[in-house]
Image: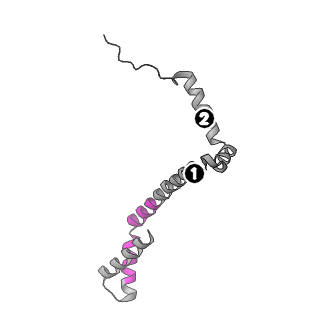
């Protein structure tokens, strides 16, 4: 029988757990994060990663709001109401609503 187990890497086992635990505690420390954000050599990296995380969270929120609007039928209802108020057909109201939503995105 051939042994197919992969050899242990440098941070496997108990030592790796200790290292990752210490790293995670350091990264979760607000004082450390403030220091990294203020330190000139690491400032750009910290800001870029923070911006990427914010963009990811914002995209998730946008998608959830859009899903709620679609599931409730609110967009279609809004298009019908606009059509009734402005005395235009629903297709034109939908086109106007889509253009407004696309400009906001």
Q: Where is residue 68 in the image (x, y as percent from the top left)?
A: 43, 63
* Numbered disc 1: secondary structure: helix
Q: Position of residue 56 (x, y in %)?
A: 48, 54
Please name which of the two marks, 1 or 2, marks the residue nearer to the observer: 1
In magenta, the rendered stretch is: 62-82
Of mark 1 and mark 2, the one earlier in the sequence is 2
Decide: is 5 above or below 77: above
Q: Residue at x 45, y 71 (%)?
A: 104
Q: Quadrant of the N terminus?
A: top left
Q: Is the magenta stretch mostly helix, strand or loop?
A: helix
Q: Where is residue 37 in the image (x, y as percent from the top left)?
A: 64, 49
64 or 103: which is nearer to us?
A: 103
The CA span between labels 1 and 2 is 20 Å
69 or 101: which is nearer to us?
A: 101
Residue 73 is covered by the magenta coloring: yes
The residue at which mark 2 appears reads as 23
* Image-based side of 79 in relation to 17, left or right: left
Decide: is 20 above or below 100: above
Q: Residue at x 57, y 53 (%)?
A: 47
Q: Which residue is drawn at 60% across and 32% down?
A: 21
Res 4 → quadrant = top left
Q: Crowding at label 1, few (<14), some or many (≥20) Cα neighbours within 10 Å?
A: some
The residue at which mark 1 appears reads as 44
Q: Crowding at label 2, few (<14), some or many (≥20) Cα neighbours within 10 Å?
A: few
39 or 86: which is nearer to us?
A: 39
Q: Which residue is drawn at 61% across and 41% down?
A: 27
Looking at the rendered structure, which numbered label has been put on residue 91? none
80 or 61: which is nearer to us?
A: 61
Given the current orientation, which residue lies at the most extreme right position? 31
* Image-based side of 40 in relation to 75, left or right: right
């Amino acid at each position: 029988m051939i042994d197919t187990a992969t050899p242990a890497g440098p941070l496997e086992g108990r030592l790796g757990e200790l290292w990752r635990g210490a790293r995670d505690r350091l990264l979760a420390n607000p004082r450390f994060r403030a220091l990294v954000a203020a330190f000139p050599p690491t400032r750009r990296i910290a800001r870029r990663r923070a911006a990427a995380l914010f963009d990811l969270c914002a995209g998730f929120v946008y998608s959830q709001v859009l899903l709620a609007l679609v599931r409730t039928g609110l967009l279609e209802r809004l298009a019908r109401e606009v059509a009734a108020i402005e005395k235009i057909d629903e297709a034109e109201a939908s086109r106007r609503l889509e253009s407004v939503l696309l400009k906001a995105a």
